[in-house]
Image (spheres, helix red, strand yellow):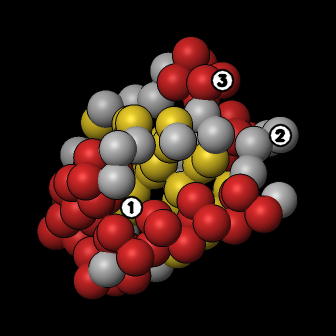
Amino acid sequence: MNIVCVAACTAGIAHTYIAREKLIKGAHALGHTIHVETQGTIGTENALSHEDIAAADAVILAVDVKIKGEERFRGKPVVRVKTEVVIKSPVKFLEKVADSLARA
């Protein structure tokens, strides 16, 4: 599965980056490709390219706040989740995403 993700927490610091790392490690453990953009106090980092988004099978918004540029994902399956969920159980969460896409 090819995944793009945006991670953003209320403070824009710790949970944003922890969620990014957990999603990357979880995706790699399951053999998925993932690109994770962060939106935090220092702005946007690792911005998703149009090519990344076009190639994605799924979009994960691991966010606790409103993000910029959400319209980029129109037409793609979007899964919204709190950062806390992907921090606690990234592999289990990604397995559920994959299962729900397989059934769709």
Disc number for residue 54:
3
- Marks 3 and 2, the one that precedes in the sequence: 3
Q: Of the residues shown, which amino acid type is indicated by label 3?
A: Ala
Evaluate if marks 3 and 1 touch, with contact meaning CB atoms under 8 Å apart: no
Which quadrant of the view contains residue 20? bottom left
**For the point 39% across and 36% down, which residue is it?**
33
Disc number for residue 8:
1
Q: Nearer the viewer, mark 3 or mark 1?
A: 3
Q: What is the C-alpha distance between the residues marked 3 and 2? A: 10 Å
- Marks 1 and 2, the one that precedes in the sequence: 1
Q: Position of residue 104 (x, y in %)?
A: 83, 59
Q: Of the residues shown, which amino acid type is indicated by label 1?
A: Ala
Q: From the viewer's side, name the closer residue of 52 and 27.
A: 27
Q: Position of residue 25 (x, y in %)?
A: 21, 54
Q: Is residue 90 visible?
A: yes
Secondary structure type for disc 2: loop
Q: Does 83 sit left or right of 61 as displayed?
A: left
Residue of label 2: 75
- Marks 3 and 1, the one that precedes in the sequence: 1
Q: Of the residues shown, which amino acid type is indicated by label 2?
A: Gly
Which quadrant of the view contains residue 55? top right
Q: Where is 34 relative to 83, above or below?
A: above
